[in-house]
Image (cartoon, rainbow, N blue to C red):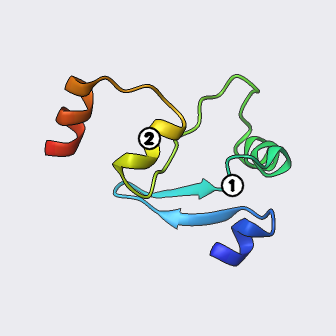
Amino acid sequence: AVAIIRNGGVVVYPTDSGYALGCQLENKQALERICQIRRLDDKHNFTLLCRDLSEISLYARVDNGAFRLLKNN
């Protein structure tokens, strides 16, 4: 799956309630492919998966209280 994502592909992965499609965040063509497959409009919000809590700061501002809440749950 990692090789597929790194090469610009789209993968299917299991979640707690079904399956999801995933790709590399910076790959606009792969994101467009997911929108095409799922028939989503260009305003659809995607879920961001982070390897750990420290990676969140690369994409969002999280205040100390919110970070503690995430860390403890």
Q: In this view, does 9 lie to the left or right of 67?
A: right
The kind of residue on which mark 2 rests is Ile
**Is residue 48 in sight in this rendering?**
yes
Residue found 80% across the figure and 69% down from its top: 7
Q: Nearer the viewer, residue 42 or 58?
A: 58
Q: Name the residue under label 1.
A: 24
5 up-or-down from 21: above or below = below
Residue found 73% across the figure and 73% down from its top: 4
Image position, residue 2 (x, y; %): 64, 74
Residue that lies at the very extreme toward the left in this rendered image: 72
What whole-number distance in Å separates the C-alpha atoms at marks 1 and 2? 15 Å
The kind of residue on which mark 1 rests is Gln
4 up-or-down from 34: above or below = below
Picture quarter containing residue 28? top right
**Is residue 73 in sight in this rendering?**
no
Residue that lies at the very extreme toward the right in this rendered image: 29
* Label 1 packing within 10 angstroms: few (<14), some (14-19), many (20+): some
Q: Earlier in the sequence, mark 1 or mark 2?
A: 1
Image position, residue 11 (x, y; %): 65, 65
Picture quarter containing residue 17? bottom left
9 up-or-down from 55: above or below = below
Mark carried by residue 56? 2
